[in-house]
Image (cartoon, rainbow, N blue to C red):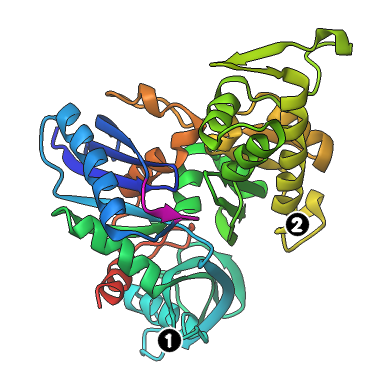
Amino acid sequence: MKRTRISAIDVGTTKVCSVMGDIDEKNNVRILGVGVSASQGLTKGMVVNLNEARESIRESVHKAERTAGYKMESACVGVTGRHISSVNNKGAVAISRNDRLVRPEDLKRVLEVARSVEVPTDQKVLHVIPRAYTVDGQDGVKNPVGMHGFRLDVETHIITAAATSVQNLTKCIRGIGIEIDDLILEPLTAAEAVLQPEERIDGVMMADIGGSTTDIAVFKDNSVCFTSVLPVGGYQISRDISIGLGLTFEAAEELKKKFGDVSPWHGESPEEDRTLTLGQHSISSHDLSEIIRARVEELVRLIVMELPDKDFAHAIPAGLVLTGGGANLSGLAELSHDIVRFPVRIGVPPALPGVSDALCDPAYATSLGLMLWRSRNTSAQMPQAKGGIRGFVSPVLRMFRK
């Protein structure tokens, strides 16, 4: 069976993860190489030092290449940062041909109309995502190609990004000799890895808690209807630990990863408070948990406040899915449920054939999701109404090359 090579690069604030693999004719993904390096030169998802960021990416790619046994030539790249914004918009066109038959070029035409929104001069449209089509007043159409009608309407979700931020990221990657296949908003790719089809249909909110940003996406009727990026994440938790316990930031980060728990007590009474040892430091488990809990409670409330529709039972009956490195804190799902009072679970990427064991962790939801997105969406194809972003990434990429 013929297999096609694909690659992905997830450039985060704390780590860079490069993944190499291939897909078969049925779009099944096999992971062949994984490389992770500490991230330098990035703040809140944006490049602030080109040389440092480029070297971090180079190290990650080289590690993946050594595992896979071949050179990475191009990759699908995730985009995030506080510069991301989104809006929902509609478009409509007439079907003027004598046969009144909706054709693929009509889909492209109506999406071009829908993307005609006012965008600040420093922003570019990153995605135009069709949510649903309407043909002569018949709404809820998933694929209108082949249908007869006089008018075609589309409802879209449009995502924009700061041109300079994306250009700096692409410059770093091309600087190490790798071409970019697609630029994809990271919460869309994380959703590919951790959301269930039923959740996407019913209505679900996903939050990817990263190092210094939290990426949010809301899905309803099997398509994305809201996206945003909060400029807070695991960094703020570690900083609070550092200040509260008088530790260096590095020690606080290690302490959080090793002993992080949002429950003040591990049992029924304060007598069960433990003494945690890290190097020459001795810390109360209760003190550590209280610091983490306070910041996590604030973060969860900020996430939920982003939801445009405050009727949670109607908007997201499937609840909240937390993923990303910050989702590894013990007790997070239980605490979040107590705060929001609707279903909460931790999203863990699935195990795939090959060397994907290291990626079966919430911290790698975006990295694995980029590969899954690449396998399920081919930019050469026309857009599909089921929520894909096919056909619109390559033109956008050309804009960011300018």
In the image: residue 2, left or right of residue 189: left
Q: Amino acid at mark 2?
A: Met
Q: Residues within 10 Å of mark 2 (few under 14, many from 20)?
A: few
Q: Is residue 122 above or below residue 400?
A: below
For the point 14% across and 32% down, the residue is: 1
Is residue 41 shown in magenta?
Answer: yes
Query: What span is colored magenta in the figure?
Result: 40-45
Residue extending farthest top: 271
Choose the circle earlier in sequence order: 2 or 1: 1
Label disc, if present, on residue 31 of the rendered structure: none
Q: Relative to 107, is 388 above or below?
A: above
| Tag count | 2
Residue highlighted by disc 2: 305
Residue 96 in which image quadrant: bottom left
Would residue 298 appear left or right of 200 to someone viewing this image?
right
Residue 223, percent from left and from top: 55, 57
Q: Is residue 382 visible?
A: no
* Residue 147 placement (x, y as % from top left): 44, 71
Q: What residue would you read off at disc 1?
A: 95
In this rendering, the label closer to the viewer, 2 or 1: 2
Q: Residue at x 69, y 31 (%)?
A: 245
Tell me residue 284's x, y (percent).
Answer: 74, 18
* Corner quadrant of residue 16: top left
62 and 70: which one is in front?
62
Q: In the image, is 118 to the left or to the right of 98?
A: right
x 58%, y 31%: residue: 252
Res. 40 visible in picture: yes
